[in-house]
Amino acid sequence: MIVDRRPLTFWERLYLPAIIGGLKVTLKHAYSTLIQRKVVTMEYPEQKWTLPENYRGAPYLVKDQEGSTKCVSCQLCEFVCPPKAIRITPPGANGQKADRGNAEKMPKEFEINMLRCIYCGFCQEVCPEEAIFLLKDYSITSASREELVYNKEKLLALGGEHGGIQKWKHKLEEAKAQENFPVKV
Amino acid sequence: MNWNFIIFSLVKLAVIVGVVQGLVAYSVLAERKISAWIQDRVGPNRTAPPFMKYVPVIGPFLTRLGMFQPLADGLKFLLKEDFTPAGVRKIYFWLAPALAVIPAMLTVAVIPFGSNLGAQKMVMADLNVGILYTFGIVSLGVYGIVLAGYAANSKYPFLGGIRSSAQMISYELSMGMSVIPVLMIVGNLNLSAIIGWQSTHGWLVFFSPLSFFIFLVASFAETNRLPFDLPEAETELVGGYHTEYSSMKFALFFLAEYSNMVSSAAMMVTLFFGGWTLPFWGLDQPATSLLLGVAHILVFMVKMLAFMVLFIWVRWMFPRFRYDQLMDLGWRRFLPLALFNILVTAIWMWLTAK
């Protein structure tokens, strides 16, 4: 492609119009920031960004409506985790039983290393019990590396309760949706 | 031995160095603040000593303006590790920052920054060859940069040093040529005499606007400021001649750059904008009272700060010139223009002479 470049006129070759135009643009911006107080930046700790609905922050464990652990220690998330940030210690043969009715067991220890986590959300996707969710926490800070390995208590406390998420009801809805999936014309 | 002279000179020296250093520190702040405003940002607005939060109204206001940022910056530079890379040529590596700073500080010596306070003239050295002295010293500033580039023993600083030497030498010519009409009109090289001439005849910028324009552009090039900041073009040369420097040695290059800005702003004010004089309110004669003397110093400072703001403003507006464009502009545009200007001034003076 040939770009048609017309030669600059004498006035343009003086650079002066361009210089004055540039000064005007910068002055306009300085005026809008200084006098009209229009800034594009956000002053972080005081002002915070409103996160979108589907934001993927730090993964935490959640409890059900009765406040019991949803995780059944199936270790699928540990298996799927790409950076191997999750480590689950299962209860063992004679270990602690689950604290809810329709589950056999719950993890003895559940650790997520927040330094390794890449917020991919695979754990949430793979979890059959809807027990782990990527919530909206994004500023995870600490004075040491050890503190950033979150254990089960901490994860459960941070995750809080997720009432309203009822796995079997969802499964039923999904099954029904799949039955009508190839939409008949 | 005239003890009076020595004591007053030392006091003046201390004050000038202090003021220039302060100006340098705060022009870095101004640079950051103005760039922020131009780019729709807020700029430094946090740093404050811990007791500032107990000061009502003024404390938060000054913090918001970033008034304590230069202190933090300076402290940071002092406390950083002064690292000497293994491959550098040690003597030159240590010599270069000093060679950059000393000429930058020396140029301020001849500039009359006020008329007089009491019996003391407000100029360090009232030389008869003020302008020549300035040009001589300014051209020494190149050595610091070239030596820094050479000492680093690494390709990017070397390129930066080479560029800078070529650039400064070429623009120094047009700068020197641009001042000649001023000298022809005034007929004196003494800066105080130039100011005196301007107080009776009017500012020289109206007599020789072309000179002023060339001087302005050349001083942008001399101080390595943005449209011509080829020596430290970050995108091409990492950091330019000071890539290998750290801590206070790096800070010295910064200091030199900003001191150069201060002194060239002062030079422009002195040569073209009447120095410490104002054509009204009776401020155009040497001060008779202490108050008037202070007023003259303030007038000078205000004019100079206006030029500093211009320097900073221009920096955040222009893209960088390409190297061949820079040389083309220097040698093929400004040098002939400056020569033409001399010729025109000479003819004009010849025609108007009685």
Image: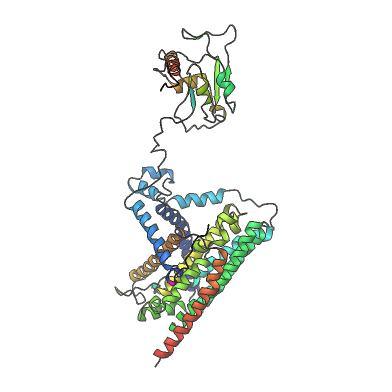
Residue A84: which quarter of the image?
top right
Residue A53, position as x, y percentages in the image = 41, 30
Residue B73 can be seen in this image: yes
Using residue B96 as the reference point, say whether residue B341 is left or right of it.
left
Front in this rendered view, residue B112 or A140 = A140
Using residue B38 as the reference point, say whether residue B104 is left or right of it.
right
**For the C terminus of chain B, which image quadrant?**
bottom left
Count of residue discs: 0
Applied colour scheme: rainbow
Residue B103 can be seen in this image: no
Q: Is residue B249 magenta?
A: no
Front in this rendered view, residue A22 or B171 = A22
In this view, the residue farthest toward the bottom is: B354
Magenta: predominant secondary structure element?
A: loop
In this view, the residue farthest toward the left is: B281
Residue B212: which quarter of the image?
bottom left
Look at the image and give the residue range highlighted in magenta.
Answer: A4-10
The relative height of residue B82 versus residue A60 in the rendered view (above or below) is: below
Residue B246, position as x, y percentages in the image = 59, 52
Residue B200, position as x, y percentages in the image = 35, 81
The relative height of residue A124 versus residue A9 in the rendered view (above or below) is: above
Identify the residue at horizontal 51%, vertical 31% (top origin).
A142
Residue B77, position as x, y percentages in the image = 54, 51
Identify the residue at horizontal 51%, vertical 74% (top origin).
B333
Residue A113: which quarter of the image?
top right
